[in-house]
């Protein structure tokens, strides 16, 4: 029962975090921290607390390097590390695959929105226009949305939904 309440609260916070990431490209530290504490509670209820904490500590340097290389933003790294204890360790690879697949979907949506917004006022027919557009403005992807989608898919799968 407590695990279900914690998962629902974490799901709500993930959706909230995705919304703030879309709106302002920010994932608040307080939200990631609350999700982490709820994830710790879920992990404790499953009996995997020590293994999950060790996993987060072990995976942290990899995501830290991704942050240094500017592949991920700091909020994205904190959110990914916060959600790891939400799923059982045997589903960790599946979690990362779900987040990656959702990331591809979100990135394609961002590209489509960007191109539609740029092209709505003028017709572009050449590929040269597309490459010039790509060079002028980098597209920002709210990866917190992909993290939330991937985690929600995995937690629903884990619950048998």
Image: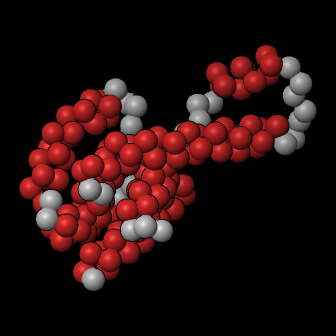
**Display coloring:** secondary structure
37 relative to 67 in the view: left or right: left
x then y, percent, for residue 8 = 38, 75
Residue drawn at (87%, 41%) of the image: 121
x then y, percent, for residue 17 = 43, 61
Residue drawn at (75%, 24%) of the image: 130
45, 32: nearer the viewer: 45
> Can you see residue 110?
no
x then y, percent, for residue 65 = 27, 29
> Can you see residue 112?
yes
Q: Residue 83's image quarter?
A: bottom left
Quadrant assignment for the N terminus: bottom left
Residue drawn at (25%, 64%) of the image: 39
Q: Residue 71's image quarter?
A: top left
Considering every residue shown, the one lying at the far top of the view is: 128
Number of residue marks? 0
82 relative to 149 in the view: left or right: left
Residue 94, above or below 37:
above
2 relative to 141 in the view: left or right: left
43, 38: nearer the viewer: 43
x then y, percent, for residue 5 = 32, 79
90 relative to 19 in the view: left or right: left
Residue drawn at (29%, 60%) of the image: 86
Considering every residue shown, the one lying at the far bottom of the view is: 1
Considering every residue shown, the one lying at the far left of the view is: 50
């Amino acid at each position: 029962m407590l695990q279900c309440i914690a998962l629902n609260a974490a799901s709500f916070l993930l959706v909230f975090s995705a919304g703030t990431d879309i709106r302002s490209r920010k994932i608040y530290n307080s939200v990631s921290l609350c999700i982490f504490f709820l994830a710790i509670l879920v992990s404790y209820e499953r009996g995997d607390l020590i293994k999950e904490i060790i996993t987060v500590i072990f995976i942290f340097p990899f995501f830290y390097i991704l942050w240094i290389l500017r592949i991920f933003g700091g909020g994205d790294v904190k959110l990914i590390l916060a959600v790891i204890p939400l799923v059982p360790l045997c589903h960790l690879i599946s979690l990362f695959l779900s987040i990656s697949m959702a990331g591809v979907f979100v990135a394609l949506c961002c590209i489509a929105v960007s191109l539609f917004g740029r092209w709505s006022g003028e017709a572009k027919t050449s590929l040269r226009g597309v490459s010039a557009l790509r060079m002028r403005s980098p597209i920002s992807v709210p990866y917190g949305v992909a993290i939330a989608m991937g985690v929600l898919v995995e937690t629903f799968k884990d619950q048998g939904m």
